[in-house]
Structures are given as structure tokens and as C-alpha cells.
Image: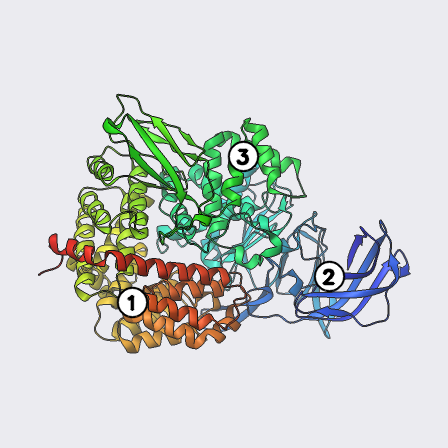
């Protein structure tokens, strides 16, 4: 039943509906029936159903539309669907749960499925008495009723505040629950009964603390009467439903002593991201899906802000320089990228859930927070929320609030970064004696072939010039400019100090050499060493530098570096080089592996790989990173350690492998094994339902490391088997891309199974796009790019056009990189002793 007011005269009412059978309809204006006897009009493409009125509905007149309808629960992770969990004894149980974002509420009930059309919702659920019923609000009443000839319970929930359809939620199933009164409304966490609910205690306590934190930061009370967090087996990521966050179970369950550091971080990031949405997105909502980026970018930024407060030893802002920022820079360096802010009319909202909306948007918000001040930024957000509670907004409303609080013109800066595609490379030259620097900006593309019509944007760029141990803010607002430097400034200077600006910096070869030496000698801070590596790597890939300059930087800095975040960036570049050169000569590939082995072995042996209970999270991560990269690069001692741990594990010592090292051990054993015994053992761990989902995910993710044609085939068959959940189809793909045979087999498998994949995954927000991205990410030649183009030439691009363009840009960029620098790289490897002549 829907009650509404007419904004104009109309002879029909149209609502969204998909895959529902509407059995009858009624329309009333007061007590007067308006429904015409003609049949309902369905528009399958628009996903709507219309009813005709025998008398027109007048402007300002209120009406009530009643649909009696039915639908079917599906298993496609969208709408109102079935999730299945398995008991310890192997028996399976179903529960029903919702996932409506962006436009799937219409699969559960006919509605005005648009974020701007907020309404209150009255939800009642009828279920068997032993099942738990959950929705956005607290329970109003429970009564026994007759349904389908059986006695069941009807649970009615209190009326919601005005809200959008995409954050409506409900679930029915068997759940275990823990609760805390540490917040002023009940906070509960639910999981399926096959899991130990006490393992949700960390997520529960964190939820209560985070709600209190955001209340204080925004100066707005949490507006609902309860907060529930639900962990289920079949869910891609997590969803911020108001008062009922639903997430994959691995994002809720933390088994102390069994879960690794990465699992704890995953839970923290999810909880704080989704709880930020309770205010930003739920209380105040974007008017159309072109504003999705603001919802997700803000939740990304706010979760990082909260994490940096709750867990200061995690060094969150430094961490983003090697994660979120690099993802954003990579995605947005491709010709097929898109502006953060898009026209809703021209965009499928399903394609907006990408690194531009989440990562680039988050980076832009961080630049704005640095521009106006972190305190002013958070206060401005609070002002924006206060002014627009329960309403829908445009992006300009946020810029206005931030400007009002800070006194700075935020819109002028933000408009360019959000409404224009891409980001710049800053070309830097210096005069004699470095008395002044000349900077010039152009759009950066990873293919290095920007056309004049693609290079018209001038970005406002805070150059953040480091010199004399301090940072000088210089704002570049034109295509090119010259800045004078103090006569006593520290040499060499560096731009983008702190690694906050969303751009690449290209120096002269001579100045790059000076910066490398400054980094080696410890004269550059951690963030600046990270950005020096990432910029040099990207600029080498695009042809601004020779790849030998990157190799020299990695070699010199890798010989002395001892910081985790810098090493994370070093390893990222080493892995990228090996992946890009994967189809080159055996000599070059083995030479790059020998180079990686020399660098990673030094740090792995220096810090060790025995993880102690007293190790901080960063220490655990550092040991894990070093051990994994050294072992997979062929370090004999690390590989033997992996085999020893695995042997003890197989002999019954389930604690022989530290949780942080599981992936490295399994991957190393599979990559170096000659037979299928090890493969079968790890496959058994994946199928063992008594293992945690985290453990099973790791086992599945490593299977592709095996290079045997027979085992590659078994892994590919497993991905679409009944043993693999929809959201896990892509999990073995990165491991398959670690060797040439796996790259080729994966792409051929995708072509052969495309129709099946499309049917299985097209209804999930990101499923099909992620599979396509993973299956093409290992391709590196022009002939492979042509094969991808030919395969999709006559196929529907619905929901994948953006990803397909990104994939092709990536393949072409890698092909150009190898074609340009393959000879130089081989000669450098020979000259430095990594290839034996």
C-alpha cells in the first residue's frame, strides 16, 4: 500500500516493479475508488507497471494505491533472496535477506524506487515461530496468525522515518545474537547458528563505540531506536541499510588467534564505513544516483578518519597512500575513465560502484579536508547534515556548508576535480642553481598518448613543495607557472609532499637521480618515498621515464629501506613488472624474478617471519608481506619454511601456520609442488565446512597458483561448480594470473563460459564486472587486446561497458610499455647480473 500526493493532474499511476506478479490493484482518493477496469500496463525495459484511473487525480489530492502481489525468492544476491549456511554436520539451511541498492527494492515490492522519493515504511513479516525476523526498525508487536494452513507468527515493526527504498531491509531466518547496552539504543550483532556468536564480540563493541563517535563528531543523535549488524554467507561486501547493516560473515566474525591482522582491519573498515552511512546517505540522501560517489566517498573518508582515531598505531593515512590512492590513480589514468560526478540520465547506476566513486572521491575529499582543515571539514559536514535531515540533496549543498564553516571557496576547487575526467601529471623543470622551478600540467594517461581534445582541463593543484625540511603550499591554477625558491632551500626539492595530491609528478632525469639519493640517505619522509616510487612506476609505464630508472630506484632504495609502507609500494611495483612482462622471454622473466628475490630476501631475513603475540598490526603485516614476496620470488629459505609449516599442518598441528601466513604458505607450496597431493590437501581445506569462511576463502584463493595444466583445469571447473558461492567465482583468478598458462586458460575459460557467468552474476552490483576485470587483467599483448575486442563486438555491453573499456585500456597500456622498454629492461638485468650471459 502506497499513500502519496499528486504533484500534477494525472490519469495514471506508475510505479517500479520487476519480476513480481500483481494479482489485483486498488486506488482510492479518500473513500472514492479511482481505478479503471483496464489491464495493468507493464514496461519490462523500464521495470514499471501502470494503473489507469477512471477519474483523474488532481494536483494536491492525496491517494492510496494498493497492490496485491507475489514474487519468488531468488539466489542472485539482489532483491529479496535466499542465503544458505551449512551446519557442522553438513546439513544446509536457508534464510531470506534483502539487498536493494541501487534499484532492486522493486524486486521485493512495487514502489517508487528512486532515492529522492523518500517515504515512511510499515513492515510486517510472517514466519515460522522459531525464526528471527529483522527489519530497519524495532518490533512493535508479535502475534500468532494462520498462514498457508499453519500457525505462524506475524512480526510488525514500528514505522520508519522518511527514507529511500534502497535502504529498506528485512530478513527472516535462524540467527544467533549478542547485544550490548554500551550505546543509548540497543546494539545487536546476528550471525547464523553454525558460527560461534561470541566471535562477533569485537564487531559488536566496535559498532557501539563508532555510533557514539559519529554522534559526537556530527553533533546529531543517531535517529533510529536500535542498530543491528547481520553477518550472512551469501553477500558481496556489505550494505548500509538504515538500522540493519547486512554484511558478508567474514566482515562480522573475528576469531582471536585464528584470524589474521587483515581480517581485523576488514571488520573495522566495514563497520565504520557502513555506520558513517547511517548519517551520510541514510539521514541525508543524494537526490539521484549521479550523487552516489558522494555517499561512498564520504563513507570512505569518514571510516579512515574514525580508524585513525580508534587505531592510531595503524597509521591509516599513510596506509591510504599505498591502497586507496593508488587504486584511484590507476583507474583514472585510463582513457575510458569517467568524472566523479556524472549525469544520472546517461548512467546505469550499477556501473557507478567503482574506484572512481569510492577511492578517487575519497581522495578528493581528503584534498578538500587538507585545503580547509580537518576540523572545519567535519564541522561543515555536521552543518550539512543538520540542515538537510531526512531530505535529499545535491552536491552543491555540501560545498556550501563546507564553505560556510571554513570561509573558503570549496566549490571552485571541488567542481573541477569532481566534474572533469582524469587528473594531471605535473612536469617540473628547474633553472640553473635551482633558483626557480617551472611547472606545467597535462592530463595523465597510462598509455601516454593524450590527444589535444583530451587535454583541455586545468586542475587547481596544491603543489605542496618540500624543501628545507618543511612544506610550502603553492597553488597551481593555470596550465603553466614559474615559482621562485628561497636561495637557501634544501636540495633537491620535491612536490606533493605528504602524498595527498591526486596527481603524478614528472621531474627531469637529473633531478630524479637526486631524489633517489635523498630517499636512500633518509632525507625524504615515508609518504614522500612512497609517492616517489608510485609516480616513477606509473611514469615509466606511460613512457615519461625509461623503466630502467624505476629499476634503479627499486634497487637502490630496496637495499636500505626498512619501512612497511614503502616496502608495500616496492612490492607492488615488482609485482606489476613481473605481471606486465609475463609473456616476454624466459630470460627476462627469470631476471625480473631474480631481481625481486634479491630485494625481498634481504628484508624478509632481516625482520623474520615468526609472528609474535606482542607484534603490532603493522609488524604482522610487514613480516607477512616480506615472507610472501620472498617465498614466491624463489627465496630458498622462505620456501623451505613454507613447506615445513605445511607439513606440520597436514600432520595435525592446526596452529603450525600463523593466520597471517596462510596465503603465503599455501601459495608457495602450490607454486613449487610437482604433483597434485598438495593441491588436493588445500582443496580439502576449502571444502571443510568446519573451517572458518576466512580460512576457506584463503584456500580457494591460492588454488590457481598450481601450474599443472590438469590442476589449472580443475580450478577453472571448480569456479562454476556447486561448491563455489556466487561471490567467490573470482576468488582464484588473481592466483591464476601469476603464471602464463593460467592467464591464457583463464581468458579462454571466460570466453567459453560467458553466457553462464552473465546469467549467474548479472543481477549482483559488481559481480560480472569484477569477473571481467580479473579475467583480462593478465593480458598484455596487442593480439590479446584484439581478441577481447572481437569477442565482445557483437555481445551486449549492458552493465559492463565501463569495465570493458577499462580492461582494454589496461591491456593496450601494458602492451605499449613492454614494446617500448623490453630491450632496455633486458639489458639492465644483464648489466646488473640478474641474467647470466
Separation of residues labelled 2 and 3 (CA atoms): 39 Å
Looking at the image, residue 384 lies above or below residue 835: above
Q: Please say whether residue 443 is visible from this viewpoint.
A: yes
Name the residue at 73% across, 75% down: 149
Q: Is residue 628 left or right of residue 346?
A: left
Q: Mark 2 against mark 1, which lies toward the viewer?
A: 2
Question: Which residue is at 19% across, 35% downward?
Answer: 521
Q: Residue 412 carries which label?
A: 3
Q: Quadrant of the N terminus?
A: bottom right
Numbered tag placed on residue 15 in the rendering: 2
Residue 220 appears anywhere in the view: no
Outermost residue, front direction? 452
Based on the displayed image, in which of its 4 quarters is residue 696 positioned?
bottom left
Which residue sits at x=89%, y=55%? Answer: 30
Count of labels shown? Answer: 3
Q: Pick the residue in front: 80 or 436.
A: 436
| Residue density around tag 2, few if under 14, some if 14–19, many if 20 or more, within 10 Å | some
The residue sitting at the left extreme is 837
Amino acid at each position: 500500500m502506497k499513500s502519496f500526493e499528486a504533484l500534477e493532474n494525472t490519469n495514471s499511476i506508475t510505479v517500479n516493479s520487476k519480476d513480481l506478479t500483481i494479482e489485483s490493484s486498488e486506488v482510492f482518493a479518500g473513500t472514492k475508488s479511482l481505478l479503471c477496469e483496464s489491464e495493468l500496463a507493464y514496461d519490462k525495459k523500464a521495470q514499471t507497471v501502470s494503473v489507469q484511473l477512471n477519474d483523474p487525480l488532481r494536483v494536491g489530492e492525496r491517494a492510496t494505491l494498493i497492490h496485491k502481489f507475489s514474487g519468488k525468492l531468488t539466489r542472485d544476491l539482489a532483491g529479496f533472496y535466499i542465503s544458505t549456511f551449512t551446519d557442522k554436520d553438513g546439513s544446509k539451511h536457508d534464510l531470506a535477506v534483502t539487498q536493494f541498492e541501487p534499484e532492486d527494492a522493486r524486486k521485493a515490492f512495487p514502489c517508487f524506487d528512486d532515492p529522492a522519493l523518500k517515504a515512511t515504511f510499515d513492515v510486517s513479516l510472517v514466519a515460522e515461530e522459531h525464526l528471527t525476523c529483522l527489519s530497519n526498525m524495532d518490533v512493535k508487536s508479535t502475534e500468532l496468525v494462520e498462514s498457508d494452513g499453519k500457525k505462524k507468527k506475524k512480526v510488525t515493526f514500528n514505522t520508519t522515518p522518511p527514507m529511500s527504498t534502497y535502504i529498506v531491509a528485512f530478513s527472516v531466518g535462524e540467527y544467533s545474537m549478542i547485544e550490548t547496552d554500551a550505546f543509548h539504543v540497543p546494539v545487536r550483532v546476528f550471525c547464523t547458528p553454525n558460527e560461534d556468536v561470541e566471535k562477533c564480540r569485537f564487531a559488536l563493541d566496535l559498532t557501539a563505540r563508532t555510533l557514539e563517535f559519529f554522534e559526537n563528531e556530527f553533533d546529531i543523535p543517531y535517529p533510529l531506536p536500535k542498530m543491528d549488524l547481520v553477518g550472512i554467507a551469501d553477500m558481496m561486501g556489505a550494505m548500509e541499510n538504515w538500522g540493519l547493516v547486512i554484511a558478508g560473515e567474514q566482515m562480522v566474525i573475528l576469531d582471536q588467534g585464528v584470524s589474521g591482522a587483515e581480517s581485523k582491519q576488514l571488520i573495522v573498515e566495514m563497520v565504520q564505513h557502513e555506520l558513517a552511512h547511517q548519517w551520510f546517505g541514510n539521514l541525508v540522501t543524494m537526490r539521484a544516483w549521479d550523487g552516489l560517489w558522494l555517499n561512498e566517498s564520504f563513507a570512505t573518508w569518514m571510516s579512515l578518519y574514525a580508524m585513525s582515531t580508534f587505531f592510531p598505531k595503524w597509521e591509516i593515512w599513510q596506509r591510504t597512500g599505498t591502497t586507496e590512492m593508488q587504486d584511484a590513480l590507476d583507474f583514472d589514468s585510463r582513457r575510458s575513465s569517467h568524472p566523479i560526478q556524472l549525469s544520472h540520465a546517461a548512467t546505469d547506476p550499477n556501473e557507478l560502484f567503482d574506484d572512481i566513486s569510492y577511492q578517487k572521491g575519497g581522495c578528493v575529499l581528503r584534498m578538500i579536508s587538507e585545503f580547509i582543515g580537518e576540523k572545519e571539514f567535519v564541522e561543515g559536514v555536521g552543518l550539512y547534515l543538520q540542515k538537510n535531515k531526512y531530505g535529499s540533496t545535491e552536491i552543491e549543498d555540501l560545498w556550501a556548508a563546507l564553505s560556510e564553516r571554513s570561509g573558503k571557496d570549496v566549490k571552485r576547487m571541488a567542481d573541477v576535480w569532481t566534474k572533469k575526467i582524469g587528473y594531471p601529471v605535473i612536469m617540473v623543470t628547474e633553472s640553473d642553481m635551482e633558483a626557480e622551478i617551472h611547472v606545467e600540467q597535462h592530463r595523465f594517461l597510462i598509455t601516454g598518448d593524450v590527444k589535444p581534445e583530451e587535454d583541455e582541463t586545468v586542475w587547481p593543484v596544491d603543489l605542496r613543495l618540500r624543501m628545507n625540511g618543511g612544506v610550502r603550499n603553492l597553488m597551481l591554477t593555470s596550465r603553466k607557472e614559474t615559482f621562485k625558491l628561497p636561495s637557501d632551500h634544501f636540495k633537491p626539492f620535491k612536490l606533493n609532499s605528504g602524498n595527498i595530491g591526486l596527481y603524478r609528478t614528472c621531474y627531469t632525469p637529473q633531478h630524479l637521480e637526486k631524489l633517489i639519493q635523498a630517499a636512500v640517505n633518509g632525507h625524504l619522509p615515508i609518504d614522500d618515498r612512497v609517492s616517489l616510487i608510485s609516480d616513477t612506476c606509473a611514469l615509466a609505464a606511460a613512457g615519461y621515464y625509461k623503466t630502467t630508472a624505476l629499476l634503479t630506484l627499486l634497487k637502490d632504495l630496496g637495499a636500505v629501506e626498512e619501512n612497511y609502507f614503502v616496502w608495500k609500494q616496492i612490492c607492488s611495483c615488482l609485482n606489476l613488472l613481473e605481471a606486465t612482462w609475463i609473456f616476454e622471454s624466459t630470460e627476462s622473466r627469470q631476471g625480473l624474478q631474480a631481481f625481486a628475490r634479491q630485494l625481498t630476501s634481504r628484508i624478509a631475513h632481516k625482520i623474520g617471519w615468526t609472528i609474535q603475540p606482542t607484534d603490532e598490526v603493522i609488524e604482522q603485516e610487514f613480516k607477512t608481506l616480506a615472507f610472501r614476496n620472498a617465498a614466491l620470488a624463489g627465496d630458498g629459505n622462505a620456501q623451505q619454511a613454507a613447506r615445513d609449516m605445511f607439513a606440520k599442518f597436514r600432520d595435525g598441528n592446526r596452529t603450525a601456520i600463523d593466520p597471517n601466513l596462510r596465503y603465503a604458505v599455501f601459495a608457495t607450496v602450490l607454486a613449487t609442488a610437482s604433483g597434485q597431493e598438495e593441491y588436493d590437501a588445500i582443496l580439502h581445506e576449502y571444502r571443510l565446512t568446519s573451517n572458518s569462511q576466512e580460512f576457506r576463502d584463503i584456500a580457494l584463493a591460492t588454488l590457481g597458483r598450481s601450474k599443472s595444466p590438469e590442476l589449472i583445469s580443475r580450478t577453472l571447473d571448480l569456479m562454476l561448480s556447486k561448491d563455489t558461492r556466487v561471490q567467490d567465482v573470482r576468488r582464484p583468478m588473481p592466483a591464476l594470473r601469476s603464471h602464463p598458462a593460467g592467464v591464457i586458460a583463464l581468458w579462454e575459460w571466460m570466453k567459453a563460459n560467458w553466457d553462464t557467468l552473465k546469467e549467474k552474476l548479472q543481477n549482483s552490483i559488481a559481480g560480472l564486472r569484477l569477473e571481467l576485470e580479473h579475467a583480462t587483467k593478465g593480458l598484455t599483448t596487442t593480439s590479446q587486446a584484439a581478441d577481447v575486442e572481437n569477442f565482445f563486438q557483437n555481445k551486449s555491453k549492458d552493465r559492463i561497458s565501463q569495465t570493458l573499456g577499462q580492461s582494454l585500456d589496461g591491456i593496450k597500456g601494458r602492451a605499449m610499455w613492454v614494446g617500448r622498454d623490453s630491450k632496455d629492461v633486458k639489458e639492465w638485468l644483464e648489466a646488473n647480473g640478474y641474467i647470466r650471459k
